[in-house]
Image: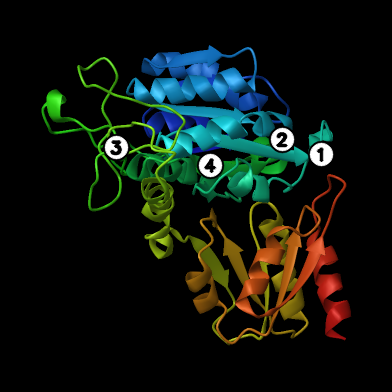
Amino acid sequence: MDNNYYLMQGSEALVRAAIYAGVRFFAGYPITPATEIAEHMARLLPGSRGIYFQGEDELASINAIIGASWAGLKSMTATSGPGFSLMQEGIGYAALTETPIIIVDVMRGGPSTGQPTLPAQQDVMQAKFGSHGDYEIIALAPANVQEMFTLTVEAVNLSEKYRTPTMILTDEIIAHMYEKAKLPGPSDLQTIERKRPQTDPTSYETFQETSDLVPPMARLGDGYAVLVEGQLHDEHGYGIGSNPAKSAKNVTKIVQKVTKDIDALARMETCCMEDHPETVIVSYGSTSRSARDAVGILRSKRIKIGYLRLITLWPFAEDAIRKQLNGVKRIFFPEMNIGKYSQYLRILGTDVIALPKLGGVMHSPNEIASAIEARWA
C-alpha cells in the first residue's frame, strides 16, 4: 500500500468500486471467468450491510437483482457468455420497466460452452441487441484494473441516473490481471442516488412523465401503488399493447432517455492525434493495450498513425467518434472476435480494415503493427 495505491486483481477492484458506489445486493451463479467477482462479493458485501445471493442459475440471478432494485437497493450481477445469454430476457424486462441494474459480462470465447478459461470480445453485439424489441442500454469497456474501479462507479451512477440496465463489458484478461490501482477516499468520487417520488402516494404514477424522461422510482413497501410488468404500459403501468400510439410512445421513451444524451455519455481516449494522421487504430478493452503499444512501434518507424480507444461502446456515439476521426481516411480495428464492432464504424464512411483474432489469444503489439505495415506497403 502506498498513498491509497494497492496491488489488486481486476475483479476485486470492480467489487470494491461497486460497494463504494452503493451496491448492496449481488446475485449471481458461478461461471468462469467471472466467479472471482462473486467470491469477492461474498467476502466483502456483508461487511457493508449488503446481501449476497447465489441463485440456482443466471435466470434466477437477473430476476433477483431486478426485484432487489425495486425494493430500493442498488443491485448487480456478474456472468460470462452462456450465463449472459440466459439473462437476456431479464435485461429486456429491466429496460422496459426502467429498472436500474448493473450487469458485468466477463467475456470468454464462444459460442456455446466455447473456451471457458480464455478471453474474447465476442459479446459486444449481444450486449446491445441480445434481448428482443427496441430498447437502449449503456455499456462501458475498461482496459485496466484502475478502470475496473472508476468505470464501475460510473456505471452504477449512470444506471441510477437513467434508470436503465448498465453493463461493464470486460474479459478474462482484465478481470484476472493484477495491477496497481488507487482506491479513492470517501469523498473523492461522486455517487448518484436514485430519484425518489416527492408526491403523495395516492397520486404517484409508476412511470410518471418527466422532462428528462426518467421518472422517480418508488420503493416497494413504502406505501406507493406500484405496477411493474412486462407489457408495454402507460404512466400508471397499465398495459396498452393494443394502442399503437401509446405503445410507440412507451418504446420511444425508453430509447430516447438514453440517446438524447448520447454525446454526454461518450467516453474515449486518444493518443498521437496532434499531427492529424490519416490512419488511426481504433480499439476497446484489453485489445487497446496492444493497440497503443503498436502505435509506438509504428511511430518509431516514422509511420504517422493515431490511436482512439472507445470506452463507451453503447450507445454508439456516432457524432463524437466522427469528430475525433475528422480527416482520417483509414481505420485499423483489432478485436478478439470475427470483426464485430468494426462493422459499426463503417457507417462513418471511412475505410475500416478489421484485424480480427479468434482462438482465445490476445493480439500482440507486434502482430498489430506488422499487419498495418503490410497494408501500408
Numbered disc 4: secondary structure: strand
Label 2 residue SS = helix
Foreground mark, 4 or 3, reads 3
Between marks 2 and 4, how big is the CA–CA gap? 14 Å
The amino acid type found where label 4 is placed reads Met
Q: Mark 2 points at which residue?
A: 81
Disc nearer the start of the sequence (3/1): 1
Q: What residue type is labelled 1?
A: Pro
Work out whether mark 3 precedes mark 2 in sequence or the reverse, and give the earlier one.
Answer: 2
Task: Give coordinates of residue 25: x percent, y percent.
Answer: 44, 21
Distance Cα–Cα, label 4 vs label 1 = 20 Å
Mark 1 = which residue? 111
- Mark 1 lies on a secondary structure that is loop
Q: Residue at x 51, y 30 (%)?
A: 15
Residue receiving disc 4 = 167
Residue 31's quadrant in the figure? top right
Q: What residue does disc 3 label?
A: 207
